[in-house]
């Protein structure tokens, strides 16, 4: 009985690592733009049920995406120092088992959105396709981080579909801002593995940008924040929203001090810190709506 319990515990631990539940940064980077979309689409008053559906759906889809990513990269991860201990490399989870887990997670995510408008149902199809196909873009796209930005920001148009039953140009503008933000933070992430990726033939923005990587990251931050300024104008937001963007800009500037020497540990620190950049944008948006209503 003890061995059986120990085996179950070990299996659950392997699933947790496979879904990256022990490393929530990916969930947070997916969650912040989704929350931007929910607050913008609802005029600052999203219903608790819809927020709960999108938050839990974010966790499920991010987990499914991680499983698919590890399944797709299972022949490469053993060659990279940072990923060589992942469950599909070391063996506690088999490839077919991983695919089944990803399917269950995606089905659960779809069941979650059944109370929402049918347009959200329809948009869940490209959302799943984006999440499932992203890992393979590292084989042929020069900047797969841009594709990741679309996948990670697709909660924005889905949020508008949930409240407006349409996807206005504003939603796509917010999605575009997220694409440039993702290029910035995921290039920082890619700088950590650049030597290994060059050796095994994986394509990343850090390799594509080469010696202009730091410049490209800072330019991407600037474009993302500039687009969010335009979003604020279109939404008619006030000073608090723009104060949030100023805080986000200061965070991006601090990231420059971390990545300018291209030290892998510092680049990874900058990547993780993007959680606070996304939070600053959301805090400015949510507070601006809240205080303008009182």
Image (spheres, helix red, strand yellow):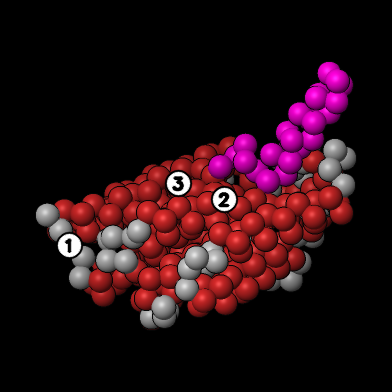
Q: Check disc 1 and report its element: helix, strand or loop.
A: loop
Q: Quadrant of the N terminus?
A: top right
Above or below for 135 versus 194: below
The CA distance from mark 2 to mark 3 is 15 Å
Residue 170 located within the stretch drawn in magenta: no
**Residue drawn at point x = 74 percent, y = 35 percent:** 12
Taking depth in this image into account, of 27 and 78 the one nearest to the observer is 27
Magenta stretch bounds: 1-24
Q: Does 247 sit above or below residue 7?
A: below
The C terminus sits in image quarter:
bottom left
The residue where tag 1 is placed is 238
Secondary structure mostly seen in the magenta stretch: helix
Q: Earlier in the sequence, mark 1 or mark 2?
A: 2
Q: Residue at x 55, y 66 (%)?
A: 114
Residue 81 visible in the displayed image: no
For mark 2, does the 10 Å Cα neighbourhood hold few (<14), some (14 to 19), or many (20 or more) residues? many
Of tags 1 and 2, the one toward the viewer is 2
**Image spot of residue 246 (x, y percent):** 27, 53
> Circle 2 sits on which residue?
59
Query: Splitting the image into 4 quarters, where does residue 276 fall?
Result: top left
Q: Position of residue 103 (x, y in %)?
A: 74, 59
Q: Residue furthest top?
A: 2
Can residue 156 be seen by looking at this rendering?
yes
Q: Secondary structure at mark 3?
A: helix
């Amino acid at each position: 009985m003890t061995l059986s319990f120990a085996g179950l515990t070990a299996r659950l631990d392997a699933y947790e690592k496979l879904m990256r539940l022990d490393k929530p940064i990916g969930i947070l980077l997916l969650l912040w733009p989704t929350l931007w979309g929910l607050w913008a689409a609802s005029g600052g008053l999203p219903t608790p049920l819809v927020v709960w559906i999108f938050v839990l759906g974010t966790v499920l889809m991010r987990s499914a995406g991680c499983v698919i990513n590890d399944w797709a990269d299972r022949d490469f991860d053993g060659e990279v120092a940072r990923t060589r201990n992942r469950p599909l490399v070391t063996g506690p989870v088999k490839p077919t088992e991983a695919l089944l887990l990803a399917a269950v997670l995606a089905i659960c995510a779809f069941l979650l959105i059944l109370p929402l408008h049918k347009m959200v149902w329809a948009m869940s199809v490209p959302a799943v396709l984006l999440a499932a196909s992203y890992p393979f873009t590292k084989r042929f796209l020069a900047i797969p981080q841009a594709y990741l930005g679309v996948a990670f920001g697709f909660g924005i148009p889905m949020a508008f579909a949930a409240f407006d039953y349409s996807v206005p140009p504003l939603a796509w503008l917010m999605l575009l801002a997220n694409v440039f933000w993702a290029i910035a933070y995921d290039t920082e992430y890619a700088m950590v593995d650049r030597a290994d990726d060059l050796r095994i033939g994986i394509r990343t923005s850090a390799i594509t940008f080469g010696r202009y990587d730091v410049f490209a990251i800072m330019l991407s931050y600037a474009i993302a924040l500039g687009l969010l300024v335009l979003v604020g104008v279109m939404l008619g937001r006030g000073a608090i929203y723009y104060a949030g963007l100023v805080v986000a800009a200061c965070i991006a500037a601090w990231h420059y001090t971390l990545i300018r020497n291209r030290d892998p540990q510092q680049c990874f620190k900058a990547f993780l810190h993007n959680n606070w950049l996304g939070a600053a944008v959301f805090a400015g948006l949510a507070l601006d709506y809240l205080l303008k209503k009182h």
